[in-house]
Image: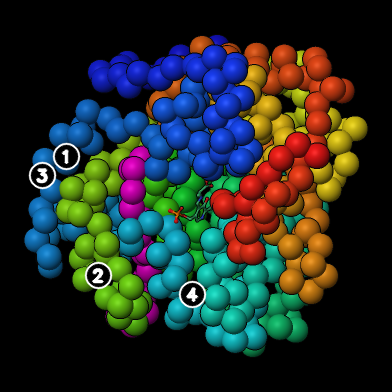
Amino acid sequence: MIYEPYRNKTVEPIRLLTRSQRKTSIQAAHYNLFNLRSEDIYIDLLTDSGTGAMSDTQWSALMRGDESYAGSKSFFRLKEAVNSLLGFEYFIPAHQGRSAELVLMSHFVGKGQISPGNIHFDTTTAHIEFQGGTAKSFVIPEANDPDNMHPFKGNFDVEKLEGFLKTHSKNVSLVIATLTCNSGGGQPVSLENLKDVSRLCKQYGVQFFFDAARITENAYFIKTREAEYKKWTIRRILRACCDLADGLWMSAKKDGLGNIGGFIAVRNEGLYETLKKYTILFDGFPTYGGLAGRDLEVLAVGLKEATDIDYLRWRTGQVAQLGMWLEESGITCIKPFGGHGVYIDARRFMPQIPEDQFPGQALSVYGYIEGGIRSCEIGPILRGRDPKTGKHKPGLDLVRLAIPRRVYSMNHMRHVADTFIALKKSAGMLRGMKFTYEAPLLAHFSSKFDWA
Ligand code: F0G
């Protein structure tokens, strides 16, 4: 058993509506969990992004926020934290991950260019495509098998990447490692694999960047799963990873332990000067980048707290505990369990539901009706349709239970497990769903559904 390395100082009441109230609210939300009001949810596992609880030190740091438009003290405090933890000399705040992506892809990606990655997160792909480029996945094949116990299922297939760079490097400006690999189930990338990819990038003259939203969780997995680094501190591992990259961006709403914020960090001064111009255009003067001074302060503290080994042990342990409870009851999840959530295989949960009746969406809806839990479909609806064929892009149909940081207790997780275990018992009776309105863009957020 793993125990919480903190105690509560403030509490936020939550309540479980009655089953009939839950049925009414999900129907009124057109069976799309994004349309629910948060007060009608008991346990909110929609995302781990910006939903964490701040520490008392972070709340105290808020008061130090310097709201000067330019050159604020808060900017320099966050810059110092980024320099000392990650080792990059140049730093630009961004209001969240995707605004950092807009800045970076505006510079790096042009029409016809290809950006290889392990698996890009959706917003990254969208920003690459927005600039006329293509995102291409080079994750190892083990990543597609939920039962495969490979310890680093976020790794690149290095041979395949090399083959690609040999013939296409002139169309590649940026290789991206997403740490951990969210779209693959929060799976980590090993330090050895990052070394190999870094070497290839140098050899073929392309930039190597990290999408570092969950880089401290990734470092924890390196420490616990990669024998050579067992004795290393998290900070040493972080630094060793970052030393391999030309730059990174981070949605600091995850491992930055903030409710909002992000940043870009690079080594090269010329690149920094170029990126700054885009930040001024999109996000604001480059010493605030769309954030309040107090947000910068919170991240300077949060980034350091996220490297604490007791916190990381608890964090990843809580995710794994929930996963184990589900697996013990015959519910197939992506294994090994990832850093920030448990991903249930919805097709195996309800094999009688045809793929075109969206078992992932249906299971998310049932999770709400049964236990007041909000989860998220990571399947065909999220991936959307292939513009050429009009068919939903292929892949697994998952329900992600993303766990906010330092928010829920193990008893809350027990309730989540009991909810899905109860559903599993009557899985054969559960029904699929159909669109009543399919939003043309990002169908996930605004489509409407009904029972099939
Ligand atoms: N990169 C990764 C790996 C992410 O997981 C996210 C967001 C982003 C970039 C974009 O950052 O939201 O700050 O603009 N992931 C959230 C999630 C939304 O629920 O997984 P953002």
For the point 81% across and 17% down, the residue is 426
Q: Residue 64: give its label.
A: 3
Dot 3 amino acid type: Arg
Residue 346 lies, with reference to residue 188, above or below; the image says above
Disc 3/disc 4 C-alpha distance (Å): 33 Å
Callout 2 secondary element:
loop
Dot 2 amino acid type: Gly
Callout 4–callout 2 Cβ contact below 8 Å: no
For the point 49% across and 75% down, the residue is 105
Quadrant holding the C terminus: top right
Q: Residue 105: give its label.
A: 4
Q: Position of residue 81 (x, y in %)?
A: 26, 51
Disc with the residue nearer the chain's start (2 vs 3) = 3
Disc 4/disc 2 C-alpha distance (Å): 17 Å
Q: Magenta stretch?
A: 257-273
Q: Which residue matches tag 1?
A: 61
Disc 1/disc 2 C-alpha distance (Å): 22 Å
Residue 66 lies, with reference to residue 423, above or below; the image says below
How busy is the neighbourhood of tag 2: few (under 14 within 10 Å), some, or many (20 plus)?
many
Quadrant housing residue 329: top right
Callout 2–callout 3 Cβ contact below 8 Å: no
Callout 1 secondary element:
helix
Q: Position of residue 19 (x, y in %)?
A: 60, 16
Callout 3–callout 1 Cβ contact below 8 Å: yes
